[in-house]
Protein backbone atom coordinates (compact mmCIF):
# COMPACT_ATOMS: atom_id res chain seq x y z
CA UNK A 1 0.00 0.00 0.00
CA UNK A 2 1.30 3.45 -0.90
CA UNK A 3 -0.01 6.37 1.15
CA UNK A 4 0.51 9.81 -0.43
CA UNK A 5 -0.19 12.46 2.21
CA UNK A 6 1.84 15.40 3.46
CA UNK A 7 0.48 15.25 7.02
CA UNK A 8 2.60 13.08 9.35
CA UNK A 9 -0.34 12.56 11.69
CA UNK A 10 -2.35 10.92 8.90
CA UNK A 11 0.57 8.73 7.99
CA UNK A 12 0.96 7.58 11.58
CA UNK A 13 -2.77 6.95 11.95
CA UNK A 14 -2.91 4.77 8.82
CA UNK A 15 0.27 2.95 9.86
CA UNK A 16 -1.34 1.99 13.19
CA UNK A 17 -4.54 0.87 11.48
CA UNK A 18 -2.59 -1.54 9.28
CA UNK A 19 0.07 -2.60 11.77
CA UNK A 20 -1.71 -5.79 12.79
CA UNK A 21 -2.99 -6.68 9.31
CA UNK A 22 -1.22 -9.74 7.91
CA UNK A 23 0.12 -9.39 4.38
CA UNK A 24 -0.08 -5.61 4.26
CA UNK A 25 3.03 -3.44 3.88
CA UNK A 26 2.66 0.32 4.01
CA UNK A 27 4.89 2.80 2.20
CA UNK A 28 4.41 6.51 2.92
CA UNK A 29 5.24 9.34 0.54
CA UNK A 30 4.90 12.74 2.22
CA UNK A 31 6.05 14.68 -0.85
CA UNK A 32 3.32 14.55 -3.50
CA UNK A 33 5.75 15.75 -6.16
CA UNK A 34 7.65 12.47 -5.76
CA UNK A 35 4.57 10.23 -5.61
CA UNK A 36 4.81 9.09 -9.22
CA UNK A 37 8.51 8.31 -8.86
CA UNK A 38 7.88 6.41 -5.61
CA UNK A 39 5.02 4.41 -7.10
CA UNK A 40 7.15 3.34 -10.06
CA UNK A 41 10.12 2.42 -7.84
CA UNK A 42 7.99 0.39 -5.42
CA UNK A 43 4.92 -0.74 -7.41
CA UNK A 44 1.94 -0.76 -5.03
CA UNK A 45 -1.23 -2.84 -5.17
CA UNK A 46 -3.26 0.16 -3.95
CA UNK A 47 -2.54 3.89 -3.77
CA UNK A 48 -4.19 5.78 -0.90
CA UNK A 49 -3.98 9.50 -1.55
CA UNK A 50 -5.00 12.89 -0.23
CA UNK A 51 -6.36 15.58 -2.56
CA UNK A 52 -5.13 18.80 -0.98
CA UNK A 53 -1.32 18.83 -0.82
CA UNK A 54 1.40 21.44 -1.42
CA UNK A 55 3.17 21.76 -4.79
CA UNK A 56 0.72 19.57 -6.70
CA UNK A 57 -3.02 19.14 -7.12
CA UNK A 58 -4.29 15.73 -6.00
CA UNK A 59 -6.64 15.30 -8.95
CA UNK A 60 -3.82 16.14 -11.36
CA UNK A 61 -1.71 13.47 -9.67
CA UNK A 62 -4.46 10.89 -10.20
CA UNK A 63 -4.52 11.82 -13.87
CA UNK A 64 -0.75 11.31 -14.06
CA UNK A 65 -1.13 7.79 -12.66
CA UNK A 66 -3.68 7.00 -15.34
CA UNK A 67 -1.46 8.43 -18.08
CA UNK A 68 1.50 6.27 -17.04
CA UNK A 69 1.37 2.77 -18.55
CA UNK A 70 3.14 1.33 -15.49
CA UNK A 71 0.50 2.66 -13.06
CA UNK A 72 -2.56 2.87 -15.30
CA UNK A 73 -4.41 -0.01 -13.64
CA UNK A 74 -3.29 0.45 -10.01
CA UNK A 75 -6.38 1.15 -7.83
CA UNK A 76 -6.43 4.66 -6.37
CA UNK A 77 -8.43 5.43 -3.23
CA UNK A 78 -8.83 9.11 -2.48
CA UNK A 79 -8.49 9.79 1.25
CA UNK A 80 -9.72 13.33 1.75
CA UNK A 81 -11.27 15.55 4.42
CA UNK A 82 -13.63 16.98 1.80
CA UNK A 83 -17.05 15.37 1.65
CA UNK A 84 -18.70 17.37 -1.13
CA UNK A 85 -20.43 15.34 -3.89
CA UNK A 86 -18.88 17.53 -6.60
CA UNK A 87 -15.36 16.84 -5.31
CA UNK A 88 -16.08 13.12 -5.25
CA UNK A 89 -17.42 13.29 -8.81
CA UNK A 90 -14.27 15.10 -9.97
CA UNK A 91 -12.10 12.44 -8.29
CA UNK A 92 -13.89 9.60 -10.07
CA UNK A 93 -13.74 11.51 -13.37
CA UNK A 94 -9.98 11.86 -12.93
CA UNK A 95 -9.63 8.09 -12.59
CA UNK A 96 -10.01 7.31 -8.88
CA UNK A 97 -11.45 3.91 -7.99
CA UNK A 98 -12.81 4.83 -4.56
CA UNK A 99 -13.29 7.81 -2.22
CA UNK A 100 -13.03 7.73 1.56
CA UNK A 101 -13.53 10.68 3.91
CA UNK A 102 -10.73 10.71 6.44
CA UNK A 103 -10.29 9.31 8.79
CA UNK A 104 -12.56 6.26 8.33
CA UNK A 105 -13.06 3.43 10.77
CA UNK A 106 -10.17 0.94 10.69
CA UNK A 107 -12.40 -1.97 9.61
CA UNK A 108 -13.80 0.04 6.73
CA UNK A 109 -10.38 1.16 5.51
CA UNK A 110 -8.90 -2.34 5.72
CA UNK A 111 -11.90 -3.81 3.90
CA UNK A 112 -11.61 -1.29 1.07
CA UNK A 113 -7.86 -1.78 0.75
CA UNK A 114 -8.18 -5.56 0.63
CA UNK A 115 -11.04 -5.40 -1.85
CA UNK A 116 -9.12 -3.23 -4.31
CA UNK A 117 -5.85 -5.11 -3.77
CA UNK A 118 -7.51 -8.47 -4.52
CA UNK A 119 -9.02 -7.05 -7.71
CA UNK A 120 -5.70 -5.64 -8.86
CA UNK A 121 -3.79 -8.84 -8.10
CA UNK A 122 -6.42 -10.80 -10.04
CA UNK A 123 -5.89 -8.40 -12.94
CA UNK A 124 -2.13 -8.94 -12.78
CA UNK A 125 -2.60 -12.72 -12.78
CA UNK A 126 -4.98 -12.49 -15.71
CA UNK A 127 -2.54 -10.32 -17.64
CA UNK A 128 0.28 -12.74 -16.89
CA UNK A 129 -1.82 -15.69 -18.02
CA UNK A 130 -2.83 -13.81 -21.17
CA UNK A 131 0.80 -12.98 -21.95
CA UNK A 132 1.75 -16.63 -21.46
CA UNK A 133 -1.11 -17.66 -23.73
CA UNK A 134 0.02 -15.21 -26.39
CA UNK A 135 3.56 -16.58 -26.17
CA UNK A 136 2.26 -20.13 -26.44
CA UNK A 137 0.05 -19.23 -29.40
CA UNK A 138 2.96 -17.55 -31.14
CA UNK A 139 5.13 -20.62 -30.60
CA UNK A 140 2.34 -22.81 -31.99
CA UNK A 141 1.90 -20.49 -34.97
CA UNK A 142 5.66 -20.60 -35.60
CA UNK A 143 5.62 -24.42 -35.43
CA UNK A 144 2.69 -24.60 -37.84
CA UNK A 145 4.33 -22.15 -40.24
CA UNK A 146 7.52 -24.21 -40.11
CA UNK A 147 5.55 -27.40 -40.77
CA UNK A 148 3.78 -25.73 -43.71
CA UNK A 149 7.14 -24.71 -45.19
CA UNK A 150 8.41 -28.28 -44.76
CA UNK A 151 5.34 -29.76 -46.47
CA UNK A 152 5.71 -27.28 -49.32
CA UNK A 153 9.39 -28.18 -49.72
CA UNK A 154 8.39 -31.80 -50.41
CA UNK A 155 5.90 -30.97 -53.13
CA UNK A 156 7.03 -31.64 -56.71
CA UNK A 157 8.25 -29.08 -59.17
CA UNK A 158 5.75 -28.15 -61.90
CA UNK A 159 6.20 -30.03 -65.18
CA UNK A 160 6.23 -27.55 -68.06
CA UNK A 161 7.35 -29.82 -70.93
CA UNK A 162 6.81 -33.37 -72.09
CA UNK A 163 3.78 -35.57 -72.76
CA UNK A 164 2.53 -35.09 -69.20
CA UNK A 165 2.47 -31.58 -67.77
CA UNK A 166 1.50 -30.71 -64.22
CA UNK A 167 1.11 -27.76 -61.90
CA UNK A 168 -0.49 -27.20 -58.50
CA UNK A 169 -1.60 -24.79 -55.81
CA UNK A 170 -1.19 -25.41 -52.09
CA UNK A 171 -2.70 -22.90 -49.65
CA UNK A 172 -2.28 -24.09 -46.04
CA UNK A 173 -4.88 -22.99 -43.51
CA UNK A 174 -3.99 -21.06 -40.37
CA UNK A 175 -4.06 -24.31 -38.37
CA UNK A 176 -2.43 -26.41 -41.16
CA UNK A 177 -4.29 -29.48 -42.29
CA UNK A 178 -2.95 -32.77 -43.58
CA UNK A 179 -2.84 -32.24 -47.34
CA UNK A 180 -0.01 -33.70 -49.41
CA UNK A 181 0.29 -34.62 -53.05
CA UNK A 182 2.73 -35.49 -55.77
CA UNK A 183 3.39 -37.05 -59.15
CA UNK A 184 6.34 -38.93 -60.61
CA UNK A 185 7.32 -41.38 -63.31
CA UNK A 186 7.19 -45.00 -62.18
CA UNK A 187 8.97 -46.19 -65.31
CA UNK A 188 9.32 -45.05 -68.91
CA UNK A 189 5.65 -45.80 -69.61
CA UNK A 190 3.80 -45.20 -66.34
CA UNK A 191 3.19 -41.95 -64.47
CA UNK A 192 1.69 -41.75 -60.96
CA UNK A 193 -0.50 -38.89 -59.68
CA UNK A 194 -1.75 -38.81 -56.08
CA UNK A 195 -3.26 -36.64 -53.37
CA UNK A 196 -4.09 -37.41 -49.75
CA UNK A 197 -5.76 -35.51 -46.92
CA UNK A 198 -5.30 -36.47 -43.26
CA UNK A 199 -8.19 -35.80 -40.87
CA UNK A 200 -7.74 -32.97 -38.40
CA UNK A 201 -5.31 -30.08 -38.25
CA UNK A 202 -1.93 -29.24 -36.83
CA UNK A 203 1.59 -30.58 -36.97
CA UNK A 204 0.49 -34.16 -36.20
CA UNK A 205 -1.76 -34.30 -39.26
CA UNK A 206 0.98 -32.78 -41.42
CA UNK A 207 3.55 -35.33 -40.21
CA UNK A 208 1.26 -38.24 -41.04
CA UNK A 209 0.58 -36.86 -44.51
CA UNK A 210 4.30 -36.41 -45.12
CA UNK A 211 5.00 -39.98 -43.96
CA UNK A 212 2.39 -41.38 -46.35
CA UNK A 213 3.68 -39.15 -49.15
CA UNK A 214 7.24 -40.39 -48.66
CA UNK A 215 6.06 -43.99 -48.61
CA UNK A 216 4.53 -43.50 -52.06
CA UNK A 217 7.43 -41.55 -53.53
CA UNK A 218 10.05 -44.01 -52.30
CA UNK A 219 8.00 -47.12 -53.16
CA UNK A 220 8.36 -48.16 -49.52
CA UNK A 221 5.10 -50.10 -49.12
CA UNK A 222 5.69 -53.87 -48.80
CA UNK A 223 3.96 -56.20 -51.25
CA UNK A 224 2.70 -53.29 -53.32
CA UNK A 225 2.54 -52.93 -57.10
CA UNK A 226 2.80 -49.20 -57.65
CA UNK A 227 1.34 -49.57 -61.16
CA UNK A 228 -1.86 -50.90 -59.58
CA UNK A 229 -3.76 -48.11 -57.77
CA UNK A 230 -5.81 -50.55 -55.70
CA UNK A 231 -2.63 -52.23 -54.48
CA UNK A 232 -1.18 -48.85 -53.44
CA UNK A 233 -4.28 -47.92 -51.43
CA UNK A 234 -4.24 -51.33 -49.74
CA UNK A 235 -0.55 -50.89 -48.94
CA UNK A 236 -1.18 -47.46 -47.38
CA UNK A 237 -4.07 -48.86 -45.37
CA UNK A 238 -1.87 -51.63 -43.98
CA UNK A 239 1.08 -49.32 -43.26
CA UNK A 240 -0.85 -46.55 -41.50
CA UNK A 241 -3.56 -48.02 -39.24
CA UNK A 242 -5.24 -45.27 -37.23
CA UNK A 243 -4.66 -47.01 -33.89
CA UNK A 244 -0.91 -46.51 -34.39
CA UNK A 245 -1.27 -42.87 -35.49
CA UNK A 246 -3.26 -41.14 -32.77
CA UNK A 247 -6.56 -42.29 -34.31
CA UNK A 248 -5.87 -40.27 -37.45
CA UNK A 249 -6.88 -41.59 -40.85
CA UNK A 250 -6.82 -40.03 -44.28
CA UNK A 251 -8.49 -39.93 -47.66
CA UNK A 252 -6.45 -40.63 -50.78
CA UNK A 253 -6.74 -40.70 -54.57
CA UNK A 254 -4.02 -42.48 -56.56
CA UNK A 255 -3.90 -42.76 -60.33
CA UNK A 256 -1.50 -44.24 -62.88
CA UNK A 257 -1.37 -43.04 -66.46
CA UNK A 258 -0.02 -45.58 -68.96
CA UNK A 259 1.28 -43.50 -71.86
CA UNK A 260 1.46 -46.13 -74.68
CA UNK A 261 -2.19 -47.11 -74.20
CA UNK A 262 -3.35 -43.65 -73.03
CA UNK A 263 -5.14 -45.43 -70.21
CA UNK A 264 -5.67 -43.93 -66.75
CA UNK A 265 -6.26 -46.27 -63.81
CA UNK A 266 -7.24 -45.03 -60.37
CA UNK A 267 -8.39 -45.97 -56.91
CA UNK A 268 -9.57 -43.90 -53.99
CA UNK A 269 -10.19 -44.20 -50.29
CA UNK A 270 -12.92 -41.86 -49.05
CA UNK A 271 -11.63 -39.10 -51.34
CA UNK A 272 -13.71 -36.80 -53.57
CA UNK A 273 -13.71 -37.76 -57.25
CA UNK A 274 -11.03 -36.44 -59.55
CA UNK A 275 -12.19 -34.42 -62.57
CA UNK A 276 -11.24 -35.51 -66.09
CA UNK A 277 -11.92 -33.17 -69.01
CA UNK A 278 -11.35 -34.96 -72.30
CA UNK A 279 -12.01 -32.07 -74.64
CA UNK A 280 -15.26 -33.51 -75.99
CA UNK A 281 -17.58 -33.04 -73.02
CA UNK A 282 -18.72 -29.69 -71.65
CA UNK A 283 -18.63 -31.08 -68.12
CA UNK A 284 -15.79 -33.13 -66.58
CA UNK A 285 -16.09 -36.83 -65.90
CA UNK A 286 -16.10 -37.58 -62.17
CA UNK A 287 -13.54 -40.30 -61.49
CA UNK A 288 -15.17 -41.69 -58.38
CA UNK A 289 -14.13 -44.65 -56.24
CA UNK A 290 -15.77 -46.63 -53.47
CA UNK A 291 -12.83 -47.46 -51.22
CA UNK A 292 -13.07 -46.69 -47.48
CA UNK A 293 -10.98 -44.19 -45.55
CA UNK A 294 -7.33 -45.19 -45.43
CA UNK A 295 -6.24 -46.51 -42.03
CA UNK A 296 -9.75 -46.87 -40.65
CA UNK A 297 -10.46 -50.54 -41.43
CA UNK A 298 -8.04 -53.48 -41.32
CA UNK A 299 -7.47 -55.85 -44.25
CA UNK A 300 -9.76 -54.08 -46.67
CA UNK A 301 -9.45 -54.38 -50.46
CA UNK A 302 -9.40 -51.42 -52.82
CA UNK A 303 -10.54 -51.87 -56.39
CA UNK A 304 -9.17 -50.01 -59.40
CA UNK A 305 -11.02 -48.43 -62.28
CA UNK A 306 -9.74 -47.20 -65.65
CA UNK A 307 -10.69 -45.24 -68.73
CA UNK A 308 -9.14 -43.94 -71.93
CA UNK A 309 -7.57 -40.49 -71.93
CA UNK A 310 -7.87 -38.62 -75.25
CA UNK A 311 -5.12 -36.19 -76.25
CA UNK A 312 -5.08 -32.82 -74.47
CA UNK A 313 -7.20 -34.12 -71.60
CA UNK A 314 -6.97 -32.47 -68.19
CA UNK A 315 -7.07 -34.18 -64.80
CA UNK A 316 -7.84 -32.09 -61.70
CA UNK A 317 -7.19 -33.51 -58.22
CA UNK A 318 -8.17 -31.59 -55.10
CA UNK A 319 -8.65 -31.85 -51.36
CA UNK A 320 -11.96 -31.17 -49.61
CA UNK A 321 -10.65 -27.73 -48.65
CA UNK A 322 -11.18 -26.73 -52.30
CA UNK A 323 -14.95 -27.21 -52.15
CA UNK A 324 -16.11 -27.53 -48.52
CA UNK A 325 -16.24 -23.75 -48.29
CA UNK A 326 -19.04 -22.11 -46.28
CA UNK A 327 -20.84 -19.36 -48.12
CA UNK A 328 -22.12 -16.16 -46.46
CA UNK A 329 -25.70 -17.47 -46.74
CA UNK A 330 -24.86 -20.55 -44.65
CA UNK A 331 -24.69 -23.07 -47.50
CA UNK A 332 -21.60 -24.76 -48.98
CA UNK A 333 -19.85 -24.00 -52.25
CA UNK A 334 -19.62 -27.74 -52.81
CA UNK A 335 -18.20 -29.88 -55.59
CA UNK A 336 -20.71 -28.43 -58.05
CA UNK A 337 -19.27 -24.96 -57.53
CA UNK A 338 -15.79 -26.33 -58.17
CA UNK A 339 -16.93 -28.25 -61.25
CA UNK A 340 -18.59 -25.14 -62.69
CA UNK A 341 -15.38 -23.12 -62.35
CA UNK A 342 -13.24 -25.90 -63.89
CA UNK A 343 -15.65 -26.36 -66.80
CA UNK A 344 -15.82 -22.68 -67.67
CA UNK A 345 -12.09 -22.15 -67.26
CA UNK A 346 -10.91 -25.08 -69.37
CA UNK A 347 -13.37 -24.26 -72.16
CA UNK A 348 -12.09 -20.69 -72.18
CA UNK A 349 -8.48 -21.84 -72.18
CA UNK A 350 -7.69 -19.98 -68.95
CA UNK A 351 -5.53 -21.02 -66.01
CA UNK A 352 -7.64 -23.58 -64.12
CA UNK A 353 -5.63 -23.39 -60.91
CA UNK A 354 -5.86 -19.64 -60.56
CA UNK A 355 -9.55 -19.74 -61.45
CA UNK A 356 -10.27 -22.35 -58.77
CA UNK A 357 -8.46 -20.37 -56.07
CA UNK A 358 -10.10 -17.10 -57.15
CA UNK A 359 -13.53 -18.76 -57.31
CA UNK A 360 -13.14 -20.25 -53.85
CA UNK A 361 -12.05 -16.92 -52.40
CA UNK A 362 -14.92 -15.16 -54.10
CA UNK A 363 -17.34 -17.74 -52.71
CA UNK A 364 -16.15 -17.46 -49.13
CA UNK A 365 -15.39 -13.74 -49.17
CA UNK A 366 -11.98 -14.26 -47.50
CA UNK A 367 -8.38 -14.57 -48.60
CA UNK A 368 -7.70 -17.41 -46.17
CA UNK A 369 -9.35 -20.80 -45.89
CA UNK A 370 -10.54 -22.82 -42.89
CA UNK A 371 -8.83 -25.94 -44.24
CA UNK A 372 -5.83 -26.64 -46.43
CA UNK A 373 -6.61 -26.12 -50.10
CA UNK A 374 -4.72 -28.32 -52.54
CA UNK A 375 -5.35 -28.55 -56.28
CA UNK A 376 -3.31 -30.44 -58.86
CA UNK A 377 -3.83 -29.87 -62.60
CA UNK A 378 -2.38 -32.48 -65.00
CA UNK A 379 -2.47 -32.21 -68.77
CA UNK A 380 -1.99 -35.28 -70.97
CA UNK A 381 -0.72 -34.13 -74.38
Image (cartoon, grey):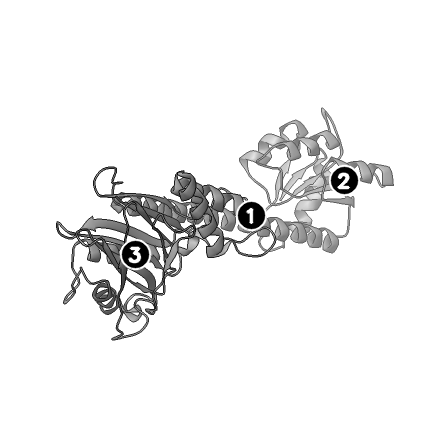
Q: Residue at x 39, y 39 (%)?
A: 351
Q: Is residue 39 left or right of residue 217?
A: right
**Image position, residue 357 (x, y; %):** 44, 43
**Image position, residue 320 (x, y; %):** 42, 56
Q: Quadrant of the C terminus?
A: top left
Q: Which residue is mark 1?
A: 124
The crowding category of the residue bearing disc 3, from other C-alpha atoms within 10 Å (few below 14, some 14 to 19, many at least 20), is many
Query: In the rendered view, would you say 120 is above or below 289?
Result: above
Q: Secondary structure at mark 2?
A: helix
Q: Secondary structure at mark 3?
A: helix
User: Closer to the camera, 193 or 43?
Assistant: 193
Q: Which residue is mark 2?
A: 92
**Image position, residue 329 (x, y; %):** 61, 53
Kindly report the distance in space between the C-alpha atoms of the residues bearing marks 1 and 2: 22 Å
Residue 49: numbered disc? none
Earlier-in-chain disc, 3 versus 2:
2
Q: Quadrant of the N terminus?
A: top right
Q: Residue at x 30, y 56 (%)?
A: 209
Which of the 4 quarters of the picture holds residue 243?
bottom left
| Residue 82 visible in the snapshot | yes
Q: Is residue 236 left or right of residue 36?
A: left
Amino acid sequence: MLLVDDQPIIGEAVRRMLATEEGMTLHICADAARALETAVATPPHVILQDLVMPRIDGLDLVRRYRADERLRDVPVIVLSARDEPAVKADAFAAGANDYVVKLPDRLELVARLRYHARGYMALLERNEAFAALQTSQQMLADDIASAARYVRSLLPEPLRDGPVRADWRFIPSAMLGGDAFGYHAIDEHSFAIYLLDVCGHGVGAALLSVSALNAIRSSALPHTDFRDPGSVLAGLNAAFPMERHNDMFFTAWYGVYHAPSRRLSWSGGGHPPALLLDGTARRPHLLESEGPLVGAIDTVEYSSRSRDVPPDSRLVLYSDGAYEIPLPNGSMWGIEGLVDVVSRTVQAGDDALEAIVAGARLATGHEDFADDMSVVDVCFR
